[in-house]
Image (tube, rainbow, N blue to C red):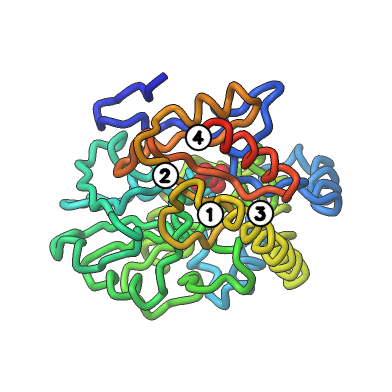
Amino acid sequence: MSAPPTEAGYDLHHHGDAEVGPGLVDLAVNVRAGTPPDWLRARIAASLADLAAYPDPAAAVAAVAARHARPEDEVVPTAGGAEGFVLLARALRPRHAVVVHPQFTEPEAALRAAGHAVDRVVLTGDLTLDPDAVPDDADLVVVGNPTNPTSVRHPAGLLAELARPGRTLVVDEAFVDTAPGEPDALAGRRDLPGLVVLRSLTKTWGLAGLRVGYALAPADLAQRLRAAAPPWSVSTPALVALAACSTPAARAEADAAARAMADDRAYLLGALDGLVEVRGTPAASFVLARTPGRTDVRARLRERGLAVRRGDTFPGLDAEHVRIAVRAPEITDRLVAALREVLR
Ligand SMILES: Cc1ncc(COP(=O)(O)O)c(C=O)c1O
């Protein structure tokens, strides 16, 4: 089964959740296992008592502003990171939009859907960012950090080189809290012109179904994003979750989860050593693997009850690539045993 091509040459709306199903072990979706935590479920459930009223973002905005030491008018709650891409595509009129690939494909899809032409800069080799590869005249640049599906984290200094007057630089930090202390995050940077940071609660907190994230942007651009949003697009339960996950205690919990994940990732990388080629230096909760000469690995693993995420829907990758979620060692053991059979 190959990916259905679109006008952009790739199925930009394909996501890992389409790979999972009954009877399959999920190594395709990058949402932290065992989430949302009970305390967060309870907070969300309690918010249902307030559903008769329209959502009021004030408390969530204040909590996010405090978390990132930014003024409240630079915070825009969104219905997931995905809505952030749509708001940007609606609010901006780029002459030369550039998306740095391989990366999450919804930003490019949102730009195309809004009628903007999109130029691709495709990273190769170890998949680290080369700021010189981005054309000087690009007035909109979108990059993920750490990047999905490569798991590569770009140094903050390299990303900062991309910011300049007359350009909007969008950094998708949906996975930045998968490392303790959020290294290389730009969310707190107010000195970089035109910087927009997008965040998501989906991955770390297991809230894909709630739709919650936020944008951080200079006040004038934040106002344009708010104006581009449908009224009340972020619900009361989502706003309650946003405030709850922005506290120091929630950040400490995310850091602890990130440390545990790093151990599981080290185990996975050790087990994959010599079996597949791991692209780049993985820094997030998944690993991009390549099996030179073999395009059937995903299908063969599926026959053995294991779902990994296909690579061929990402510009810059092909069917020799799969993305593997970091899981507990016993699941990794199952994966690696199956991989050995498949690659024998
Ligand atoms: C890199 C990246 N950014 C953003 C998103 C969007 O997440 P959400 O809209 O659920 O916040 C995803 C989801 O897969 C992602 O992988």
Q: CA distance from mark 4 to mark 3?
A: 32 Å
Q: Which mark is residue 290?
A: 2
Residue drawn at x 42%, y 31% is 13
Toward the front, the furthest residue is 344
Circle 1 sits on which residue?
Answer: 273
Give the camera-side residue of 263 and 76. Answer: 263
Q: Is 82 on the left-hand or right-hand side of 120?
A: right
Circle 3 sits on which residue?
Answer: 204
Point out the frontmost of discs 1 and 2.
1
**Quarter of the image with the N terminus in it:** top left
- Under mark 1, the amino acid is Asp
Give the camera-side residue of 121 and 293. Answer: 293
Tags 1 and 3 in contact by the CB under 8 Å rule? Answer: no
Quarter-wise, where is residue 54 in the image? top right
- Under mark 2, the amino acid is Arg
Circle 4 sits on which residue?
Answer: 343
Tags 4 and 2 in contact by the CB under 8 Å rule? Answer: no
Q: Residues within 10 Å of mark 4 (few under 14, many from 20)?
A: few
Point out the frontmost of discs 4 and 2.
4
Label 3 SS: helix
Mark closer to the chain start, 3 or 2: 3
Label 4 SS: helix
- Report whether residue 48 is seen: yes
